[in-house]
Image: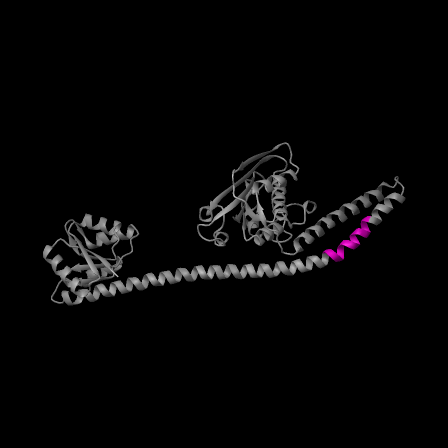
Amino acid sequence: MSVKILLIEDNPDHVLITKDVLALASKDWQVDSLGDPKQGLKAVIDGDYDLVLCDYRLPGSSALDILKKMKEKGRDLPFIVVTSAGSEKVAVDIMKEGAYDYVVKDETYEEVLPLIVGNALERHNAKKEKERAEKELKIAYAKLKETQEMLIQVEKTEALSRMAAGVAHEVKNPLGIIIQAANYLETVLSQKDTNVFEILGTIKNSVKRADNIINGLVDFSRARELNLKPEEINVILKDSLVLIEYSKNIEIIEELSENLPRALVDKEKMRQVFTNLLLNAAQSMAKRGKLFLRTYVKEIDKLAGKIEKGNRDRFVPGEKVMVTEIEDTGIGIPEEDLRIVFDPFFTTRGPRDGAGLGLTIAKNIIDMHKGVIDIKSRKDEGTTVIVALKI
């Protein structure tokens, strides 16, 4: 494997000696030389050299000047200083600035130089290999941690799903009996007893709320099976929009890309996802604001500002995904709540406005599709939900 070495030296005789020594030491070492320090620095920064040999004293400059500027530009290369007279001060100054080594122009030069060059190359390669291994280890650790967290979440979700199915079955029958009893009492009691009718109304409203929670649990615990077909995301999104009641003061702005490829999805489950997201957006705006709907196709790598890295890593680098954005100008979500918005029963709204399962169910459905859902929000500045699906 060819190794490119740059020699910055203004003495022609020494250039010839150095080139001959290195040529004899290894056929793989290719040496270029420059005598002007400015040209040498430019070659170091712009070139593709593997090692730099630089004379300590140069016209109007020095090896330390070049080394400092090389570091400032972010170039990490083995840098060896050649000096006519070695000293402890020179060695200390050189090493402080990050040089790999130095070699003295004396009777041992021709013998020592190849050893110093070879050692510097080995150290640099070992350093790069260590950095590469550490980077891969960090990535592997992050993925392992993410996988562990996902497995824990899956176990919790599965356990909760089983529990939810059982609870739903056991609770629905008593609720039915309570609502029937309340309806019967309304028919037999006197209309004059307003206090009793208010109590019955409270009972019926409470039962309806409990029933809504049970229905959410049923949805949450349903079998994780999909009826996948090629579908038009724009059509599903518009169908979901029709199901939501909006105030006249909410402006809906559609930015839907035309001629989108069809996505392989379960139409009914995706409609459920969009309905939940649209309902959340509408409720967050307190009947006034703007709702932006966007669809487009983009490479997953280009969504760095919108989708967290851990979520992007679920796709192949460069893979194109179908993106749906639902953005509102509502009250937003506090930063401390963003990490738990997908947890079961979490809600920022009051107890009358839902069981806090909408986002949990939406995330489970998107996970089933092997897609991702991400939320960006700031308190009092609105929320954007991004859904990315394979196409």
Residue 26 is situated, as x and y percent measured from the top left of the image, at 20, 64
In this rendering, the answer to whether 163 lies above or below 290 is below
Residue 85 in the figure: left or right of residue 269 = left
Relative vertical location of residue 52 with respect to residue 237 in this rendering, above or below: below
Residue 170 is situated, as x and y percent measured from the top left of the image, at 75, 58
Task: Confirm whether the magenta stretch covers residue 154.
Answer: no
Quadrant where the N terminus sits is bottom left
Judged from this view, the residue extending furthest toward the front is: 230
State left or right for residue 263 relative to residue 120: right
Query: Is residue 305 at least partly visible in the picture?
Result: no
Image side of residue 123 versus residue 105, left or right? right
Mainly helix, strand or loop, the magenta region? helix
Residue occupying image coordinates x 56% and y 61%:
151
Q: Residue furthest left?
A: 13
> Where residue 141 appears, x then y in whole percent?
46, 62
Q: Which residues are magenta?
A: 168-179
Q: Quadrant of residue 379?
A: top right
Residue at 62% from the left image edge and 58% from the top image edge = 157
Q: Judge whether residue 369 can be spotted in this image.
A: yes
Residue placed most toward the observer, 65 or 25 = 25
Q: Is residue 148 above or below residue 323?
A: below
Total number of numbered discs in the rendering? 0
